[in-house]
Image (cartoon, rainbow, N blue to C red):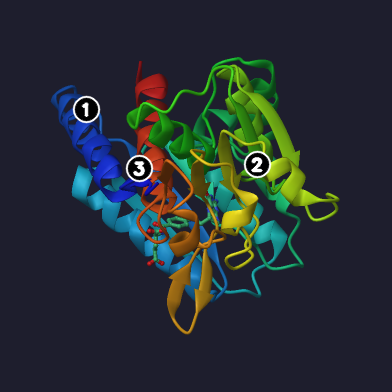
Amino acid sequence: MTATVIDGKKIAHALRERLKQEVAELAAHHVQPGLAVILVGEDPASHSYVRGKEKACESLGIYSKVYRLPASVSEAELLHTIHELNESSLIHGILVQLPLPSHISESSILLAISPDKDVDGFHLMNVGKLQTGLPTFLPCTPHGVIQLLQYENIPIEGKHAVIVGRSNIVGKPLAALLLQHNATVTICHSKTVHLKNFTKQADILIAAVGKLRMITADMVKSGAAVIDVGINRVNGRLVGDVDFEEVRHVASAITPVPGGVGPMTIAMLLYNTVEAAKRLES
Ligand SMILES: Nc1nc2c(c(=O)[nH]1)N[C@@H](CN(C=O)c1ccc(C(=O)N[C@@H](CCC(=O)O)C(=O)O)cc1)CN2
C-alpha cells in the first residue's frame, strides 16, 4: 500500500481563497478584520511563524500589527499591552506567540486576553467552552487537523483516534474536537507503557510530541490515516514525528512535514480572525 499524501498547502490555500472573499465582503461594509500578534524574545522559529502570520494577513487584506518585544520585557508591561489591545477598535484578534520566556507566567498572560478576541482559543473560558461543546474559537492546529481529515473524506465518527502527545496547544484540544466528532479517543504520552500497543489500534494516528521520526512503520495499523503535527529541525531541515518514508507504505493517508498540518495552523488563525471581526462588528 502507498498512502495518499495529504497536501496541507493546497487545502490551506483553498481555505484562504474563501476567506479572502469574506474579507472583501466585510470591506464593503467598512469592516477590516485586525489581528495583533505579540512576540517576545529572539527564538528564530517563533519569528519565522510570526512573519508567516503577518504575510498571510497581508495577502487576505487583514490588518495586522506585530509587537516584537525583548526577552527582558516584564509581565506587567506585557499585561499593559494586552489591556490596550483588548480596548482597541482596530483589533479583533489578539495572540501571544508561544513559548514565552520562563520569567513570564503563560497562564496569567493568556487569561488577560479578552475571550472575545482570543483567536488562539487558549483563554480558560474558551478552553471550557470547547470541553463542553459550546461554540468558541477553536485552537488553530487541532482545528486544522479536523479540516484536513474532512477535506480528504477520512471518516472520524466511530473511529479510534490515538493522539501521541498531551500538550495544551494540540493534544488536549484535539482530543476534545475528535470526541465532538464522535471518535473514540486515546491520548498517549511520555509515561505511556507499551506505546506501540495503542498506536497499532489507531484508525487515525496523530503524532504531536516533537520527537524526531518516533512513529515507525511497525507502530502503525495497515490502512490508518497518519497525521504528523511534529516539527523538528535537523541541520536547518524540518522533519516530523513520523518516519514518513517508512510509514507511507503502511498508512492509507499521511501528512508530510513540511507542507501538512503547519500551513493549516495559519489558515485557521485567519479563519478565527475573520470570525472575531464578524462577531464583534455585528
Ligand atoms: N500562540 C501560538 N503559539 C504557537 C502556536 C499557536 O498555534 N499559537 N503553534 C506553534 C507554532 N505555529 C504557530 O504559531 C506554527 C507552526 C508551524 C507553521 C507552519 O506553517 N509550518 C510549515 C513550515 C514553516 C517553516 O518552514 O518553518 C509547515 O509545517 O509546512 C505555522 C505556525 C507554536 N506556537
Whether 38 is drawn above or below 183: the answer is below
Q: Secondary structure at mark 3?
A: helix
Q: How many marks?
A: 3
Picture coordinates of residue 84 (x, y %)? 53, 45
Return the disc, 3 or 1, that comes first in the chain's sequence.
1
Q: Which mark is residue 22?
A: 1
Return the disc, 1 or 2, that comes first in the chain's sequence.
1
Q: Which residue is denoted by mark 2 in the rendering?
A: 163
Amino acid carrying label 1: it is Glu
Amino acid carrying label 3: it is Ala
Whether 47 is drawn above or below 21: the answer is below
Residue count near mark 2 (Cα–Cα under 10 Å), binned few <14, some 14–19, many ≥20: many
Whether 160 is drawn above or below 230: the answer is above
Would you say residue 272 is visible in this rendering? Answer: no
Residue count near mark 1 (Cα–Cα under 10 Å), binned few <14, some 14–19, many ≥20: some
Q: In the figure, is residue 155 to the left or right of 7? A: right
Q: CA distance from mark 3 to mark 1?
A: 14 Å
